[in-house]
Amino acid sequence: MSLTKDFPRVELSHKPTPLELLKNVSAEFATNVWIKRDDCTGLAFGGNKSRQLEFYLGQALKEGADTLLTTGAVQSNHVRMTVAAARKMGLEVEVQLEHRVAREQPEYHNSGNPYLVKLMGAKISYYPEGEDEDGADKALEVRAAEIAARGGKAYVIPLSNAHTPYGALGYVDGAEELMAQLDALQIEPVRFVVPTGSASTHTGFLLGVRACGCVAPVHGVCVRRDGVSQMQRVKAKLNSVIEVIGTHIRIPDDDIICDDSMLAPGYGLPSEATVDAIRYLARREGVLLDPTYSGKTFALLIDMLKRGDFGHDDHVVFLHTGGTASLFGYPELVDDE
């Protein structure tokens, strides 16, 4: 029985998403490498955010909202998919873009996600700070009050950890879906490798996997913060999710893995290893990764494979969270060859 069955939600995603064996990668490294294709969720280029947004929009509609408000970086997948979800559900939508990544290339500011946000007709404002989550959320609350003053009803999808993490419920469900696929194939994974940024995906996934009785490590790959800071963020969000669901499942601290070895040079800034990973999977399997989340995560997995961390009969699962649209904001991925 799903832990999330009692929460309001809407349907935004194509589910179940495929679970595929990366045959060429598996042959090269003599290990069974699987990919959970959450880049194929189907909402405006797809990605992990649609699972999260199903619960945010369920709550928004329950509260009678007519407008969605959210915030994120210029190339935010979350912002793009929030706009798409709003349009799908017939809601107005306003987004706040933060100056979070030090990139001045015109493609970064005009192609990919910001292009799609404009195409879908969202109202856009800008927030000057990139590392001020509370301030960014407060700016949204100010705008929500302005909408209320003219008779509207806005629902804020927040950024900081100081709010009920409804989005994490999407990956409690996502983990249950994946475990059912693995069980059908009679596969017992030795490790899951997932990105960890806002921590909603990591948190929900870890809780969902443990709720299914699987004890394989969930290896979180940091894409925004150092490992110590991210571990505290995941822990706080995990406690909030457990509280809101009302489950008796407990996750010990040593079960929270936050690996920051692929973080440098920072959020949204790909290292040479990340660029190599993106090119490798594109050319080896025809699978497209993004520079901010999935590219860094797969780069860490390649590192593990090269070290020989897995055996011939082992099965490791990589969670592909999408981000395809943001590739168009990074022309140097092909220009510098």
Image (cartoon, grey):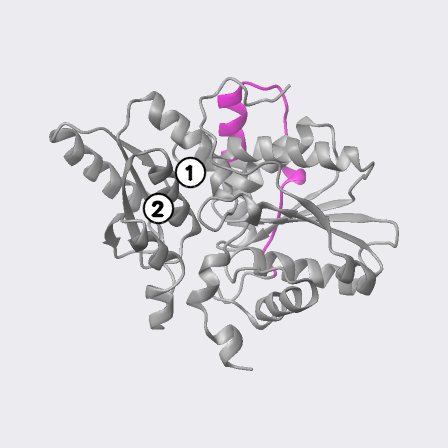
| Numbered circles on residues, count | 2
The residue under label 1 is 161
Q: Is residue 80 above or below residue 264?
A: above
| Left or right of 85, for residue 250 | right
- Could you say which quadrant of the image residue 172 lies in? top right
Residue 7 screen position, x and y as percent: 47, 21
Q: Residues within 10 Å of mark 2 (few under 14, many from 20)?
A: some
Q: Is disc 1 placed on a helix, strand or loop? A: loop
Residue appearing at x 46%, y 32% in the figure: 54
Residue 258: in magenta span: yes
Disc marking residue 72: none
**Label 2 close to label 1 by CB (< 8 Å):** yes
| Left or right of 248, for residue 304 | right
The residue under label 2 is 133
Residue 320 screen position, x and y as percent: 60, 50
Residue 45 screen position, x and y as percent: 48, 51
- Could you say which quadrant of the image residue 101 lies in? bottom left
Q: Is residue 66 above or below residue 134?
A: above
Residue appearing at x 67%, y 26% in the figure: 211
Residue type pointed to by label 1? Asn
| Left or right of 13, for residue 175 | right
Residue extent of the magenta highlight? 237-261
| Left or right of 216, for residue 133 | left
Residue type pointed to by label 2? Glu
- Could you say which quadrant of the image residue 285 lies in? bottom right
Quadrant (top left/top right/bottom left/bottom right) for the N terminus: top right
Quadrant (top left/top right/bottom left/bottom right) for the C terminus: bottom right
